[in-house]
Image: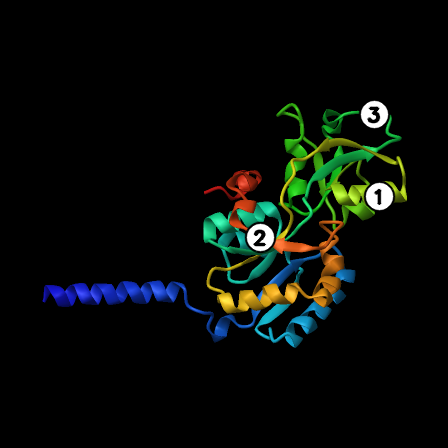
């Protein structure tokens, strides 16, 4: 009787373990691959990438442009099923909390700057942005989170204005913002278009860039096919406008867990911390 009980318990444990690693069922197919985009003009790249993946035999993957930012963030926070192109702090969270698998990352490092107009007569250093409007992307993107962390004094804070594209705000003649939080590579683009028009007030730490991460229940066979597809020049060329949001170069390299250490998620702790 005791042997029978032990056998039953063993079978139950094996069954539960297998269920946790099971392939997606029909209700989870196709597997969504979420790509965050800054403008509607990038949707064409998303549509074309779907065609390239389908031609490569990856009909089980549906490429989706992120339109509802809160749902995208919530999915990463709670570990929802899918594949995500994720910022470094989101990726570190999903790996640590939900055992997501890193696949490929943009090779070029990522860092942010806070800038202001060179012509400003009142803004000379970061603390001068206290109570001033600073354009950043939607919360809780890294540029948004880093704005108030940049001040030397803890009581100082900016009025952060969430915009679709900080780059477009900087190029606009009637932006409401005095300061701008933007990736370093986009700042350099703007400096080429308008040499000397902006100055850097603050610079963030350097991060490993955006990365494709996958839910742990997605089969390794699908991930292997996905890696191979992203190795093709056609898909890289198709997605170059999407990747150019985050890097000047669009080459991808194998991503490792150690590329996204626990301290990357630290800016999220005040918002997502348990």
Which of labels 2 and 3 is toward the front? 2
Residue placed most toward the observer, 173 or 204: 204
Residue highlighted by disc 1: 190
Q: CA distance from mark 2 to mark 1?
A: 30 Å
| Label at residue 161 | none
Toward the top, the furthest residue is 153
**Element assignment for label 1:** helix
Q: Residue at 19% of width from left, 66% of height from top?
A: 7
Q: CA distance from mark 2 to mark 3?
A: 43 Å
Q: Residue at 79% of width from left, 41% of height from top?
A: 187
**Element assignment for label 2:** loop
Q: Is residue 201 left or right of residue 78?
A: right
Residue 31: percent from left, percent from top: 55, 68
Where is the C terminus found, in terms of image quarters?
Answer: top left
Residue 31, relative to residue 213: is it above or below? below
Residue highlighted by disc 3: 122
Q: Hey, which quadrant is residue 204 in on the image?
A: top right
Where is the N terminus found, in terms of image quarters?
Answer: bottom left
| Label at residue 255 | 2
Residue placed most toward the observer, 53 or 36: 53
Q: Earlier in the sequence, mark 1 or mark 3?
A: 3
């Amino acid at each position: 009787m005791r042997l029978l009980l032990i056998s039953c318990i063993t079978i139950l444990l094996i069954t539960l373990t297998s269920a946790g690693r099971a392939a997606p069922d029909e209700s989870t197919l196709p597997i969504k691959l979420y790509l965050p985009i800054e403008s509607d003009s990038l949707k064409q790249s998303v549509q074309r990438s779907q065609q390239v993946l389908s031609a490569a035999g990856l009909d089980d993957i549906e490429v989706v442009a992120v339109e509802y930012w809160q749902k995208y963030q919530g999915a990463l926070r709670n570990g929802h099923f899918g594949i995500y192109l994720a910022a470094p702090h989101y990726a570190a969270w999903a790996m640590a909390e939900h055992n997501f698998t890193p696949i490929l990352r943009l090779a070029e490092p990522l860092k942010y700057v806070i800038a202001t107009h060179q012509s400003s007569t009142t803004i000379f250093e970061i603390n001068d942005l206290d109570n001033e409007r600073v354009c950043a992307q939607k919360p809780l993107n890294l540029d948004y989170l880093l704005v108030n962390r940049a001040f030397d004094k803890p009581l100082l804070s900016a009025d952060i204005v969430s915009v679709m594209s900080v780059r477009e705000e900087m190029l606009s003649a009637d932006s409401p913002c005095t300061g701008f939080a933007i990736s370093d590579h986009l700042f350099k683009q703007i400096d080429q278009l308008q040499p000397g028009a902006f100055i850097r007030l603050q610079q963030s730490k350097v991060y490993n860039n955006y990365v494709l991460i996958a839910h742990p229940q997605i089969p390794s066979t699908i991930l292997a096919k996905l890696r191979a597809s992203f190795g093709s020049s056609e898909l890289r060329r198709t997605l170059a406008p999407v990747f150019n949001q985050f890097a000047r170069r669009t080459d991808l390299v194998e991503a490792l867990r150690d590329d996204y250490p626990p301290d990357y998620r630290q800016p999220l702790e005040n918002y997502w911390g348990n």
